[in-house]
Image: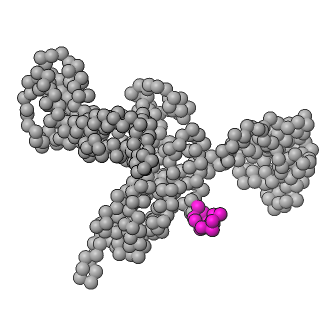
């Protein structure tokens, strides 16, 4: 016995027929078709489909023709466009009425249909829902129990065309662990929701960040630049996907939330402040949302009904940021007043993730600085020992130009020997904060003369820190040999 379950999303009855007839004949089959499309009904009027194509300029196989007298858009082969729209309308009608159309098609093919009812079976619906929950729970458990892998293995698998089921689970576990910085449990896998939660947390992190200072463009208009963390995301995405033209505009989404006044509201809520919903800033947020509902829909993909309350509208914005609210109703002056605050567990979890992401950024910046210092030390050593500049690495083209020329990595060190000494003295002062071993490691890359010069300049610039250094390492003179 064979069974099929169909949802009308993108296939018409004629497209589904081969799937049903792929089995041997005279075999009973059970076919269940959803009563309606899950994403709404498609347009079935061929004329309207044609007008939409012409207005949005979505034609790819037809040449555009504009009437000189009326300015009306059209196609060079209008009859072909009409035929295409007729086919599209018929296909949409079949998708909208998939249950009826598929049954009629199977009857025309000589099949015997035994209807088991067009209505919904409540018991079966509950059973399918329970089965779906059980399948999800099993997936969460398998991800949490998958074998641990390192980043190198994860990155190599991202370029493979096919992964085994257990490899998919291992990659999912690594992604979650690397994203949230905590041990992976079935509850965390469920909370991650296939990577949707971290996108919300990143959006929350962006709106909580301090915006840039007010700036003025060439036309005298004032605007607030996004925080560096938001601008860097847009920049890195454009550098990583150089040939793509459909980049995400994180700065635009941030600006919309900033214009809504959401940051001020969040700062209060994140600190534990309770609201009733009639506060001035909540009302202003709701009024701005309703007045710019089309822009909110286009940028944040959030529909704002004009009849909803300010608290409901605020709840929708919080949901997009991975937050939810809880309420209490104390008795005040003989009346029950409802107070809202952020869900405590949500705030604690998100704060841990935000702290982890901040530590990651600091570690990346520290490693970048260390890499620059090592490159500068290597360049100085090459210059002092051989009198040549070290091979340079082409810079990242921040302006988007096609600049393939090299760049000197020892700008500050190229003037003279004393300039190099002063430069390394500043590095030594900075490295002392990480320990004496870091200073010793830096000095080991220099010549003997440069080491003495660095220590002399160190004492000249920061006498107090130099005293700390010799107190911790009284044998520092031995480093000079």
Q: Residue at x 58, y 53 (%)?
A: 231
Residue 216, image x, y percentages: 63, 66
Protein image colouring: one colour
Residue 449, image x, y percentages: 92, 44
Q: Residue at x 42, y 31 (%)?
A: 168
Tell me which secondary structure the magenta stretch mostly adopts: loop
Circle count: 0
Q: Is residue 100 left or right of residue 195?
A: left
Residue 186, image x, y percentages: 36, 42
Q: Does the segment drawn in magenta span residue 348?
A: no
In depth, the one of 61 and 252 nearer the eye is 61
In depth, the one of 284 and 326 nearer the eye is 284
The answer to whether residue 290 is visible is yes
In which quadrant of the rendered view does residue 28 lie?
Answer: top left
Q: Is residue 190 above or below residue 23?
A: below
Q: Quadrant of the C terminus?
A: top right
In which quadrant of the rendered view does residue 24 lie?
Answer: top left
Q: Residue at x 83, y 49 (%)?
A: 412
- The residue sitting at the bottom extreme is 333
Q: Residue at x 69, y 43 (%)?
A: 401
What residue range appears in magenta?
212-225
Q: Is residue 332 above or below residue 452?
A: below
Q: Is residue 465 left or right of residue 84?
A: right
Q: Is residue 54 left or right of residue 333?
A: right
In depth, the one of 480 and 392 nearer the eye is 392
Q: Is residue 78 left or right of residue 350?
A: left
């Amino acid at each position: 016995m064979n069974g099929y379950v169909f949802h009308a999303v993108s296939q018409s009855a004629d497209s589904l027929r081969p799937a049903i007839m792929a089995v041997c004949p005279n075999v009973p089959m059970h076919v269940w078709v959803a009563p309606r499309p899950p994403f709404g009904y498609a347009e079935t009027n061929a004329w309207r489909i044609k007008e939409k194509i012409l207005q949005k300029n979505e034609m790819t196989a037809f040449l555009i023709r504009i009437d000189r007298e009326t300015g009306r858009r059209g196609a060079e082969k209008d009859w072909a466009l009409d035929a295409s729209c007729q086919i599209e309308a018929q296909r949409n009608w079949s998708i909208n009425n998939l249950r009826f159309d598929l049954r009629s098609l199977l009857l025309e093919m000589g099949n015997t249909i035994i209807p088991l009812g067009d209505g919904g079976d409540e018991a079966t619906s509950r059973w399918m829902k329970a089965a779906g929950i059980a399948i999800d729970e099993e997936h969460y458990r398998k991800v949490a129990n998958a074998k641990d892998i390192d980043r190198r293995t994860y990155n190599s698998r991202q370029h493979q065309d096919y992964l085994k089921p257990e490899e998919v689970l291992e990659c999912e576990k690594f992604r979650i662990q690397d994203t949230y910085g905590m041990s992976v449990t079935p509850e965390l896998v469920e909370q991650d929701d296939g990577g949707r939660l971290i996108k919300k947390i990143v959006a929350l992190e962006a709106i909580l960040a301090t915006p840039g200072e007010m700036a003025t463009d060439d036309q005298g208009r004032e605007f607030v630049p996004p925080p560096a963390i938001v601008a860097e995301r847009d920049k890195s995405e454009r550098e990583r996907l150089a040939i793509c033209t459909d980049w995400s505009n994180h700065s635009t989404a941030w600006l919309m939330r900033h214009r809504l006044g959401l940051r001020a509201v969040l700062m209060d809520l994140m600190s534990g402040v309770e609201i009733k919903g009639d506060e001035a800033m909540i009302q202003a947020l709701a009024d701005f949302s309703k007045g710019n509902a089309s822009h909110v829909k286009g940028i944040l993909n959030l529909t704002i009904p004009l009849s909803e309350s300010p608290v409901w509208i605020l709840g929708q914005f919080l949901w997009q940021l991975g937050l939810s609210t809880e309420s209490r109703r104390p008795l005040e002056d003989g009346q029950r007043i409802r107070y809202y605050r952020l869900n405590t567990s949500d705030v604690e979890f998100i704060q841990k993730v935000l702290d982890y992401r901040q530590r990651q950024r600091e570690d990346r910046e520290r490693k970048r600085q260390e890499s620059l210092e090592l490159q500068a030390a290597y360049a100085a050593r090459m210059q002092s020992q051989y009198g040549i500049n070290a091979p340079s690495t082409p810079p990242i083209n921040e302006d988007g130009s096609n600049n393939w020329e090299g760049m000197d990595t020892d700008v500050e060190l190229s003037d003279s020997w004393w300039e190099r000494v002063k430069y390394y003295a500043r590095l030594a002062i900075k490295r002392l904060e990480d320990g004496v071993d870091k200073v010793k490691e830096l000095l080991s890359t220099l010549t003997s003369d440069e080491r003495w010069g660095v220590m002399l300049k160190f004492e000249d610039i920061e006498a107090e820190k130099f005293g700390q250094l010799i107190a911790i390492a009284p044998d520092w003179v031995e480093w000079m040999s």
